[in-house]
Image (cartoon, grey):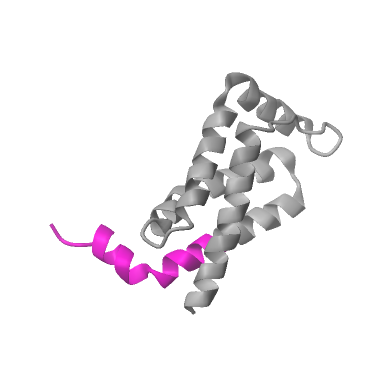
Amino acid sequence: MNTIIYVIRLLLSLLFVWHGAEKLIWHHPVPVNEVNNSFVVFYNLLAESGYIYFIGFCQLLSGLLLIFKKTYLLAVIMLIPMVLNLIACHVFLSHQTGYIIFDTTILLLLLFLIRMNYQVLQKIFLREF
């Protein structure tokens, strides 16, 4: 089971490091013909305001934190709201089924990592004061 967890962490790490770096360094506009117009407007607003750099930094940081055993649970907790936001953007704005399925798969992998560490997280978050 440890090997499966490690492989999931590695794949998610590569994914988020790549996409975070892409937003920070190689930022490119969304092709208009591929997605719904409302998503293009939304994404361009993120880019013009500079908020896309914050998203990229958070993705890059989370991807790096996934690598290390002592910090990967923090990364998973950080990534769950980001991935939920990605799913919501694709459901409500882009309507791209492929992206919805891909992002939902990422969410399920993150929830699997949470489930595998439930005992640890229970001691941290559900202890009595």
The part of the image, by quadrant, that contains residue 70 is: bottom left
| Residue 88 visible in the picture | no
Q: Is 67 above or below relative to 78?
A: below
In the image, is residue 123 part of the stretch drawn in magenta? yes
Q: Which residues are magenta?
A: 108-129
The verdict on residue 98 being magenta is no
Query: Which quarter of the rendered picture does the C terminus lie within?
Result: bottom left
**Residue furthest top in the image:** 48
**Residue found at the far left of this picture:** 129
Residue nearest the observer in this picture, 33 or 73: 73
Residue 25 picture location, percent across and down: 64, 32
Q: Position of residue 100 (x, y in %)?
A: 69, 52
Per the picture, the main secondary structure of the magenta-coloured stretch is helix
Position of 128 compared to 77: left or right?
A: left
Residue 73, quarter of picture: bottom left
Where is 9 relative to 62, above or below? below
Q: Is residue 55 visible?
A: yes
How many numbered callouts? Answer: 0
- Residue 66 image point, x, y percent: 48, 56
> What residue is rendered at 73% in x and 40% in y?
94
Observer-nearest of 91 and 77: 77
